[in-house]
Image (cartoon, helix red, strand yellow):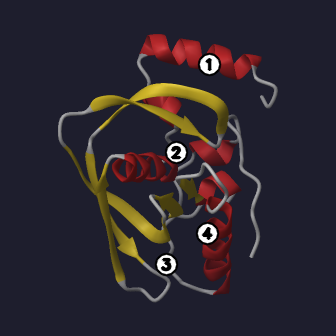
Amino acid sequence: MAVRSIRFFGDPVLKSRAARIDTIDDGVRSLVRDLLDTVELPGRAGVAAPQIGVSLRAFSYNVDGAIGYILNPELVEASGEPSLVGEGCLSVPNLWHDTLRHPYARAVGIDLDGNDVVLEGEGLMAQALQHECDHLDGTLYLDRLSPAERRIAMREVRESDWF
């Protein structure tokens, strides 16, 4: 178990579609432990496997005191009138931009025992489900910004000390 380093914008793993997990083995169990350890740090609502350099479909979440994970998640519903909500990302540190998100989301997947998992919610949970599933498809929240907002964000990235 370990808190893993977060990969930053520009790392190719963040722009690639993550592979499905076909076999739950010791490597996947270790990945889940690392995702849970990594998401437990303050200020973290979610960590997707690609953010720690592993191109597999898994993420952990830490929303309103609930900490957990899901394997092979699929976003099966994102509903309600989308609105702009402030959003950031560990892979694009110190940036915060309004992103269009649905107020409700539901994802389905499995746990380490192969049991079905359903995660759903409104507010921060809905936002986290959409954000983390995007990561697994190689999409960063920057990709969802309006063109004008994206130009501002990209300028901020270029001027950042981590880029």
First-in-chain label (1 vs 2): 2
Q: Residues within 10 Å of mark 2 (few under 14, many from 20)?
A: some
> In the rendered image, which residue does mark 3 sit on?
22
Do tag 4 and tag 3 residues touch (Cβ < 8 Å)?
no
Q: Residue at x 57, y 47 (%)?
A: 16
Marking on residue 70: none
The C terminus appears in which quarter of the rendering? top right
The residues tagged by marks 3 and 1 sit, at their Cα atoms, a distance apart of 36 Å
> In the rendered image, which residue does mark 1 sit on?
154
> In the rendered image, which residue does mark 4 sit on?
36
First-in-chain label (3 vs 1): 3
Q: Residue 136 location, x and y as percent?
A: 50, 53
Q: Quadrant of residue 25?
A: bottom right
Q: Residue at x 51, y 48 (%)?
A: 135
The answer to whether 78 appears left or right of 148 in the picture is: left
158 up-or-down from 11: above or below: above
The residues tagged by marks 4 and 2 sit, at their Cα atoms, a distance apart of 21 Å
Q: Quadrant of residue 159?
A: top right
Nearer mark to the viewer, of 1 and 4: 4
First-in-chain label (2 vs 3): 3
For mark 2, give the secondary structure. loop
The residues tagged by marks 1 and 4 sit, at their Cα atoms, a distance apart of 30 Å
> In the rendered image, which residue does mark 2 sit on?
138
For mark 3, give the secondary structure. loop
First-in-chain label (1 vs 4): 4
The residues tagged by marks 4 and 3 sit, at their Cα atoms, a distance apart of 20 Å
Q: Residues within 10 Å of mark 1 (few under 14, many from 20)?
A: few
